[in-house]
Image (spheres, rainbow, N blue to C red):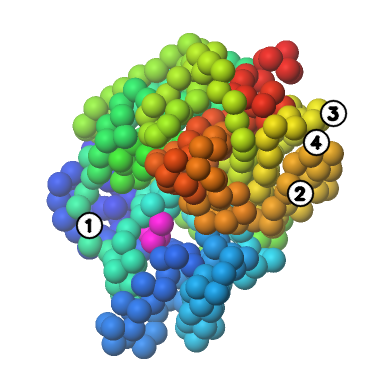
């Protein structure tokens, strides 16, 4: 017996089964880092005295946080990563051929079900949407993983989240995960795996599943994970059909939790009672239904990030914004999650819709999500964002306020000039 996550970890340490609390060495299938975390990992890697990474095809470096470079310091960071990537021959994404790491890796065929994926970024858990065990680690651990192809970790317990019923209009993965975090708190799944299942998850498009797995860390989780079903299989086939560039073997193993698997807890929700959610400052758990948001005027709306920067997210926003104008009292920024998302959105006319609505459209970058650039907030400003965190100072000034919501709520709020529901303008 075993959970989905336990089965994957067992397979990667040569054992039939593992149990929560056990320590193990597990082989990894993919190691990733970005322009903030890779430099430290590279320096630690060099201190190990190892000349080459364990497998250049399984190490991916993506300069996405401060790139295009915002200043000299970020340029030096990116240069260090670029030179290491060239010297080692690892997979490297450059500006103009890249995007946000947690968007492009699945999109480009680097993520397969049943794999163990580690990254020097807390939102590496995003990739669990494709049935992989994916988790963030510190840069020192990533240095060791790059050198040896292994990680040392404690097996986490699994909490099963079952979502029953049919989703209401304008309700998606962002709302389910915000509602869940609001229920269990930011430490409600501390060092646990959040296993998402139920008919509502089966109905979610892949964008919604990526969003839920992405924000598992906001509940303190070690990983978020979903079963591999026909939608996941279709997504994987699509990366092949589009000629994606990973060049990795397409063979993979699909694991499923046993019926008698032992869980640390089982939590069930009726999604038909959930409306679009808004997380108020300064925690992702400070959640209210959008109907109870009150009159909160905004200075900025941001649509994008590794949480909601995929094509389906932009389609949803464009559906609201088509033929409408952004309120003159605020600015709105749209950041596609990858060059491919940008190109597809351009071909579909979404970019034209955004520009016509008075929106600034950016090249793919994490940028303002972490208060980096291209949308940093001043003191006293309020931003409604489709990103994943709203801590004090997250997007700029510690005296600014960040609210979190889905792309439809963000688009509607951009038109209204305040936090509001899509129903107010789209019916």
Q: Are marks 3 and 1 in contact (CB under 8 Å)?
A: no
Residue depth check, mark 2 versus mark 4: number of the one nearer the observer: 4
Task: Decide if residue 380 is in sight here.
Answer: yes
Judging depth in this view, the residue of 421 and 118 nearest the camera is 421
- Separation of marks 1 and 4 at Cα, in angstroms: 48 Å
Tell me which label, 2 or 4, sits earlier in the chain: 2
Location of residue 150 (image quadrant): bottom left
From the viewer's perspective, tell me whether residue 16 is left or right of residue 63.
Answer: left
Q: Do the residues labelled 1 and 2 touch (CB within 8 Å)?
A: no
Label 1 residue SS: strand
Task: Determine crowd level at label 1: few under 14, some 14-19, many 20+ residues with C-alpha closer than 10 A.
Answer: some
- Separation of marks 2 and 4 at Cα, in angstroms: 19 Å
Q: What number is the disc on residue 344?
A: 2
For residue 354, above or below residue 29: above
Residue under numbered circle 3: 323
Judging depth in this view, the residue of 231 and 384 nearest the camera is 384
- Separation of marks 3 and 4 at Cα, in angstroms: 7 Å
Asked if residue 118 lies in the magenta stretch, the reply is: yes
Tell me which label, 3 or 4, sits earlier in the chain: 3
- Separation of marks 3 and 1 at Cα, in angstroms: 52 Å
Q: What number is the disc on residue 153?
A: 1
Residue drawn at x 20%, y 52% is 154
Residue under numbered circle 4: 357
Asked if residue 226 lies in the magenta stretch, the reply is: no
From the viewer's perspective, tell me whether residue 193 is left or right of residue 271.
Answer: left
Where residue 2 appears, as percent x and y from the top left, is 25, 40
Label 4 residue SS: loop
Tell me which label, 1 or 2, sits earlier in the chain: 1
Where residue 94 appears, as percent x and y from the top left, is 62, 70
Q: In which quarter of the image is the C terminus?
A: top right
Residue stretch rendered in magenta on the structure: 116-121
């Amino acid at each position: 017996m075993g959970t989905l996550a336990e089965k994957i970890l067992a397979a990667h340490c040569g054992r039939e089964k593992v149990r929560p609390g056990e320590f193990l060495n597990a082989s990894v299938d993919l190691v990733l880092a970005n322009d903030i975390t890779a430099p430290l990992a590279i320096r630690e890697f060099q201190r190990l005295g190892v000349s080459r990474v364990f497998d250049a095809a399984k190490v991916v470096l993506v300069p996405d946080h401060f790139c295009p470079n915002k200043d000299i310091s970020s340029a030096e960071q990116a240069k260090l990563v670029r030179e290491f990537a060239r010297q080692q021959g690892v997979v490297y994404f450059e500006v103009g051929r890249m995007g946000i790491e947690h968007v492009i890796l699945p999109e480009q065929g680097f993520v397969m079900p049943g794999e163990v994926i580690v990254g020097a970024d807390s939102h590496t858990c995003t990739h669990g949407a494709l049935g992989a065990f994916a988790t963030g680690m510190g840069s020192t651990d990533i240095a060791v993983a790059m050198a040896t192809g292994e990680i040392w970790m404690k097996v986490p317990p699994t909490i099963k989240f079952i979502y029953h019923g049919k989703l209401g209009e304008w309700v998606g993965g962002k709302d389910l995960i915000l509602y869940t975090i609001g229920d269990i708190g930011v430490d409600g799944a501390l060092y646990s795996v959040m296993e998402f299942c139920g008919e509502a998850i089966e109905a979610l498009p892949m964008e919604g599943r990526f969003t839920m797995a992405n924000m598992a860390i906001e509940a303190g989780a070690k990983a978020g994970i979903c079963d591999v079903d026909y939608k996941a299989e279709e997504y994987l086939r699509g990366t092949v059909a589009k000629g994606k560039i990973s060049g990795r073997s397409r063979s993979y193993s699909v694991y499923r939790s046993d019926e008698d698997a032992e869980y640390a807890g089982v939590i069930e929700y009726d999604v038909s009672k959930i409306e679009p959610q808004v997380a108020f400052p300064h925690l992702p758990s400070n959640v209210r239904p959008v109907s109870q948001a009150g009159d909160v005027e905004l200075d900025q709306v941001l649509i994008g990030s590794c949480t909601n920067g995929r094509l389906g997210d932009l389609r949803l926003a464009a559906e609201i914004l088509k033929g409408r104008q952004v309120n003159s009292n605020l600015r709105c920024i749209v950041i596609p999650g990858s060059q491919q998302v940008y190109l597809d959105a351009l071909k579909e006319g979404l970019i034209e819709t955004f520009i016509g609505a008075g929106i600034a459209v950016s090249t793919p970058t994490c940028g303002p999500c972490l208060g980096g650039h291209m949308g940093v907030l001043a003191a006293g400003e309020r931003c409604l964002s489709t990103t994943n965190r709203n801590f004090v100072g997250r997007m700029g000034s510690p005296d600014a306020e960040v609210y979190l919501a889905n792309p439809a709520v963000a688009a509607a709020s951009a038109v209204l000039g305040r936090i509001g529901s899509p129903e107010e303008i789209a019916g």
